[in-house]
Amino acid sequence: MLDLSALKFDQNGLIPVIVQDFSTNEILMLAYMNKESIDLTIETGYMHYFSRSRDKIWKKGETSGNFQKVKALYLDCDGDALLAVVEQTGVACHTGNKTCFFTNIFGEDKKSEVDILFKLIETINDRKKNKIEGSYTCYLFEKGLDKILKKVGEEATEVVIAAKNGSKEEVIYEVSDLIYHLSVLLSYFDMSWTDIFKSLEQRRK
């Protein structure tokens, strides 16, 4: 449990909080909290912040639907900053980006290997909404669930054959095909890889 007496609020009664995605470890945003917003976060299980510009407490997602379910709160060694680990619904940034930290001003972009899964399903979701001539993904959605399931089954069989052949290159290629078609299936049901990660996390316990 968080010991609120250990928190060092500034002269305005605020403390900065860094927000991190539970599934990807990606840094999503920086915000501020006061004692009341921390109490509300712990009480409801959803992140509440204090808006300095509006001078009021706000619940993340109350207008956008991009809620943040709190998984854990950490206090830094000096007691003057918090880390919130959250389950992010949708995107964190008001610009429509997944994270507020999308502008690189120096150095190489830090990418997580799991990012490609989220980028892939973002593209697939876009193809589901916006038809592009010649797009294979659009073709799958046009043909419907039976076609998607048929391709998932075919690709799963191809993985088995590649493994039986003992070819690592074939396994990599076929597993990639399978993951793509599984991503299409998830998108069809308005799901994402985050839902799968949650299920896998439960199986670790």
Image: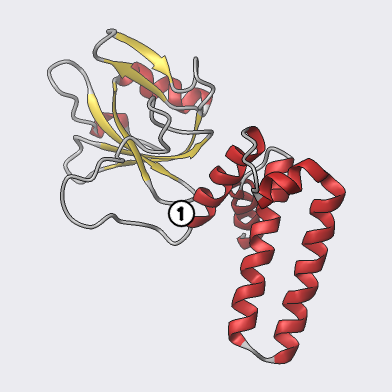
What residue lies at 75% left-to-right and 48% top-to-bottom? 140
Left or right: where 46 falls relative to 3: right
Location of the C terminus by quadrant is bottom right
Residue behind mark 1: 115
Give residue 193's position: percent from left, percent from top.
60, 50
Dividing the picture into quadrants, the one containing residue 20 is top left
| Residue located 44% across and 25% down the image | 41
The residue lying furthest to the left in this view is 11
- Say which quadrant the N terminus sits in: top left
Residue 122 percent coordinates (x, y): 54, 43
**Crowd band around label 1 with a 10 angstrom C-alpha radius: few (<14), some (14–19), many (20+):** few
Q: Amino acid at mark 1?
A: Asp
Considering every residue shown, the one lying at the far top of the view is: 55
In the foreground, 64 or 16 = 64
Q: Nearer the viewer, residue 167 or 9?
A: 167
Colour mode of the rendering: secondary structure
Closer-to-camera residue (96/61): 96
Please report the residue visible at 28 percent of the width from the left and 54 percent of the height from the top: 109
Tell me the quarter of the picture where residue 12 sits: top left
